[in-house]
Amino acid sequence: LAENAVECLHNEQYDQPYNAQNLNHTNLLFTGGRDHESLSGEWRFTLDLHDTGLRQKWHLLEKRDAEMRRDPYDYDPFAGDTVPVPGCWQMMNEKWFYFEGSAWYTREIDYIVQDADERIFLRVGAANYDCKVFLNHQFIGNHYGGSTPFCAELTPLLQPGNNVLMLCVNNNRTTDRLPLRNNDWFNYGGIYREIDIIRTPRTYIQDLFVYLVPDGNYNQIAVRIAVEGDATEVNFALAELGISVTMPVIDGVAEATLSAEPQLWSPEHPKLYRVMASLGRDCVSDRVGFRQIEVVGTDIRLNGKSLYLRGVNCHEDDVLLGKMTNEADIRRRFQDAKELNCNYLRLAHYPHHEMAARIADEVGLLLWEEIPNYWAIDFKNPATQRDAHNQLMELIYRDRNRASVIIWSVGNENADTDERLNFMTSLVDAARQADPSRLISAACLVNHAKMKIEDRLADFLDIIGLNEYYGWYEENFDDLIVLGENSSPTKPVVITETGAEGVIGDHAPQSGPFSENYMADVYRKQTEYLPKLNYVRGFTPWLLYDYRTERRQNPYQNGFNCKGLITADKITRKKAFYVLRDFYQQLKNAGS
Ligand code: GCB
């Protein structure tokens, strides 16, 4: 054995240098208006269940002809299988369907210098869950979190001509991650969103945040521009409103409040304005809508008008693509929501593709966005806390220019312990600090013995999310009325989940639980009760499409949660779909 192979095999600390959590939201680069050089396409690929690659340091392997190799080797990153990126490995090979562990992606990139002063960033739209980046055989950094984008600067290690990029992605479900081991959606693995190279000048615009000042006057626009490198001023323009200003940069940040009277964005009138920021030869842009969302007592108001959220939940899941999505898929989802007469969607239970909020901005749908702070995560663990915080910030920095996004959700159905309260309130504070233009919520807890919403977190939220499954997990619908009376909430409550399984198919039951008819009855009952629940300001059934999930294994479900209003083919509407559609039509007609 070659000396270094022995050393690698016996090095028990093999993964130590890879643990730095250094690819986080502070590395995120504002991408609007920038050129992207896509790295989508075929990458060399292998699974690595035992993390042999980290132990043997596969990233050190040079490209060589087999005859030229002198050391024994268990993998050649430059030969063998390739897979398309983006993609989920489950969807590529039947043998990989339940694989949980590490996988290696390798690709050679040809770097042609365009400007002697340029900086080069790798941007990964999402990789589930832990992603280690290596360039030219050296470790660059590690990113945790399976649904948010991250950037890694390649500049110092990049050479003109051929370069080797390797990514090691691990999708193990562990107790310190978000979500934790136990949840109700499929644990897909891989680089499943776009991966790009982005070039910037040495000094560049790192972030641009533009929003309507939420003071009820609708006549001031706040601009915040973060700059990386030495700069004393930066330009901002919103040509359609005649705005063009130069803003001083102090400690890397330029801030201004500008007078303007924009047409307001709303689902009925999704007006967007082009904004631009420039610094030397760096220039970024975005399309931004201006609107105000607020809570007044138990009312939710958009642009000062009372708003009832007619919604539906949605997972990011596809029978053929897994967790990967595309523009057509997102547009179809929104079209189906509009056919239901929805004005809003809850994108459960993790950040969906960034295109979703862009399209929602354009087609006029309101969004609830969430991080996978789901059920019993390890609230005491500082690493889990850092991870949750980072996922929330990455989501907020990614989407805070999107008018459609009105709510950040910090969690779903977490037991009310002291650790959880500390953990979650720190997330609430961080979200408020990063973004004064949205509401904060979470799906809270009900004490069923007292029949009351009882969750200390509720005091810190703007909206109380309530998951109630009357007709499915719970029985007596009258409890919904009692729940309201006992809780007498002083802020708006939105039903964030309700529903029932409804299976369509040759062997599906025709009546009773799991039948389509039973599901429709649950929806009839829910919608009959809803008008009596004056504490409720929105309704979000679980959910638009049936979706894949390992935990649902009875013969009717067969690996799918079947509470969708449409089956997993995204075509076949169940009876409950029409019940909800008609109910929302009535609400719409009544002006809600
Ligand atoms: C819930 C969870 C959701 C599940 C759903 C169900 O309360 O929030 O993730 O999938 O119930 O179908 O039971």
Image: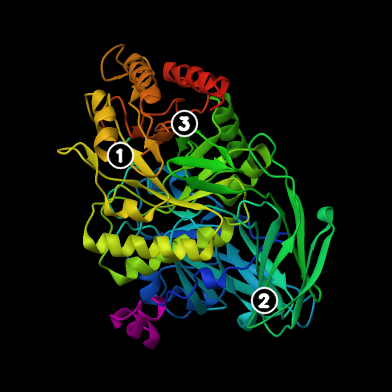
Vertical order, 322 against 164 (above or below): above
For the residues labelled 3 and 1, the Cα–Cα distance comes to 30 Å
Please give the label number shown on residue 227: 2
Q: Secondary structure at mark 3?
A: loop
Which residue: 27% across, 63% down?
Answer: 379
Report the front residue among 385 and 118: 385
Which residue: 75% across, 50% down?
Answer: 262
Q: Nearer the viewer, mark 3 or mark 1?
A: 1
Which amino acid, mark 3? Answer: Leu
Residue, disc 3: 544
Q: Nearer the viewer, mark 2 or mark 1?
A: 1
Where residue 81 sits: x, y (%)? 51, 56
Q: Is mark 1 within 8 Å of ligand 1?
A: no
Report the front residue among 279 and 452: 452
- Farthest top residue? 510
Q: Secondary structure at mark 2?
A: strand
Please give the label number shown on residue 488: 1
Q: Which residues are magenta?
A: 1-19
- Farthest left residue? 449
Name the quadrant containing residue 563: top left
Which amino acid, mark 2? Answer: Val
Where residue 317 sits: x, y (%)? 47, 40
Q: Is residue 4 magenta?
A: yes
Describe residue 450's horizontal placement relative to residue 224 as left or right: left
Where residue 286 sits: x, y (%)? 72, 56
